């Protein structure tokens, strides 16, 4: 199966495989830095984070390669009585024209190596001045934890995992506000359960 088929298969279940609750680091970050305005959620999956942002008053745009993910995200938005603009496709396929965003949120958005630097560079261009990138993703060190506990999730190959240097370099031009690699205990649906290692990053466009 290709990546689209894999993610459609993952999201086809009735259960929200990463849960309906938003990512903890994302929630704390928008509060800590008092963020608002237009927010973009690439690789948004089932919509838990974009829906939360819409409920917090953000003007939300989101996209993912999975149409099944979009269906569940829109269902969650309807259930939560909020509106999100959710498109299907890769960054090269969705069209935001000259739109600029105040926040771009990348939660476990692991792109293939050939796309990572291209996408992250384009996200920098899509930010307004003083705009923020919020990112949490699995570290290369997570592979060891994944072998012990597959329920922690994350890509099974090092090439699609992060290190602090990779993330800092891929967002060249942003001021590094926060950047750390740390061990965490995740409790997100059925796919992110247990101890793992993540990279957390916040960058600001001057």
Image: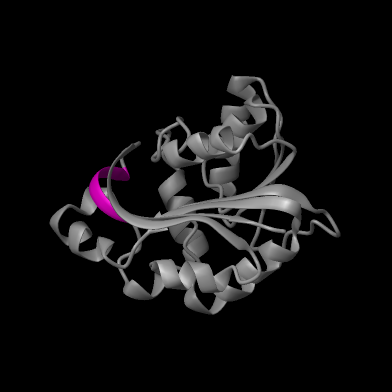
Q: Residue furthest right?
A: 98
Q: Quadrant of residue 204?
A: bottom right
Going by the image, does 37 lie left or right of 33? right
Question: 78 above or below 169?
Answer: above
Q: Nearer the viewer, residue 34 or 140?
A: 34
Locate the C terminus by quadrant: bottom right
Q: Quadrant of residue 205?
A: bottom right
Task: Identify the residue shown where x is 62% and y is 68%.
Answer: 119
Task: Identify the residue shown where x is 65% and y is 59%.
Answer: 89
Task: Identify the residue shown where x is 50% and y is 57%.
Answer: 109
Q: Residue furthest bottom?
A: 114
Q: How many marks?
A: 0
Regarding residue 182, the answer to whether it shows in the image is yes
Q: Nearer the viewer, residue 14 or 43?
A: 43
196 in the magenta segment: yes
Regarding residue 162, the answer to whether it shows in the image is no
Locate the N terminus by quadrant: bottom left
Going by the image, does 22 lie left or right of 71? left
Q: Position of residue 26 (x, y in %)?
A: 50, 40
Task: Identify the residue shown where x is 57% and y is 30%.
Answer: 52
Q: Nearer the viewer, residue 146 or 171?
A: 171
Q: Give, as a single range, the part of the protein colored magenta.
A: 191-197
Q: Position of residue 163 (x, y in %)?
A: 39, 68
Q: Residue furthest left?
A: 148
Q: Nearer the viewer, residue 156 or 8?
A: 156
Q: Position of residue 16 (x, y in %)?
A: 42, 35
Main secondary structure along the magenta-highlighted residues: strand
Q: Position of residue 70 (x, y in %)?
A: 60, 43
């Amino acid at each position: 199966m290709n990546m689209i088929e894999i993610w459609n298969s993952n999201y086809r279940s009735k259960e929200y495989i990463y849960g309906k609750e938003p990512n903890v680091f994302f929630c704390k970050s928008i509060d800590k830095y008092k963020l608002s305005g237009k927010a973009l959620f690439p690789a948004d999956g089932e919509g838990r984070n974009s829906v939360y942002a819409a409920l917090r008053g953000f003007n939300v745009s989101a996209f993912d390669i999975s149409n099944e993910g979009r269906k569940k995200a829109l269902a969650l938005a309807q259930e939560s009585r909020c509106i999100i603009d959710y498109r299907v496709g890769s960054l090269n396929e969705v069209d935001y024209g000259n739109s600029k965003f105040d926040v771009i949120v990348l939660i476990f958005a692991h792109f293939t190596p050939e796309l990572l630097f291209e996408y992250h560079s384009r996200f920098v261009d899509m930010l307004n001045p003083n705009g923020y990138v919020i990112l949490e993703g699995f570290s290369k060190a997570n592979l060891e934890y994944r072998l012990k506990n597959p329920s922690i999730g994350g890509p099974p190959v090092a090439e699609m995992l992060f290190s602090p240097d990779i993330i800092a370099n891929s967002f060249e031009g942003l001021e590094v506000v926060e950047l750390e690699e740390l061990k965490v205990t995740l409790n997100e649906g059925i796919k992110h359960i247990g101890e793992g290692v993540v990279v957390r990053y916040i960058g600001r466009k001057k």
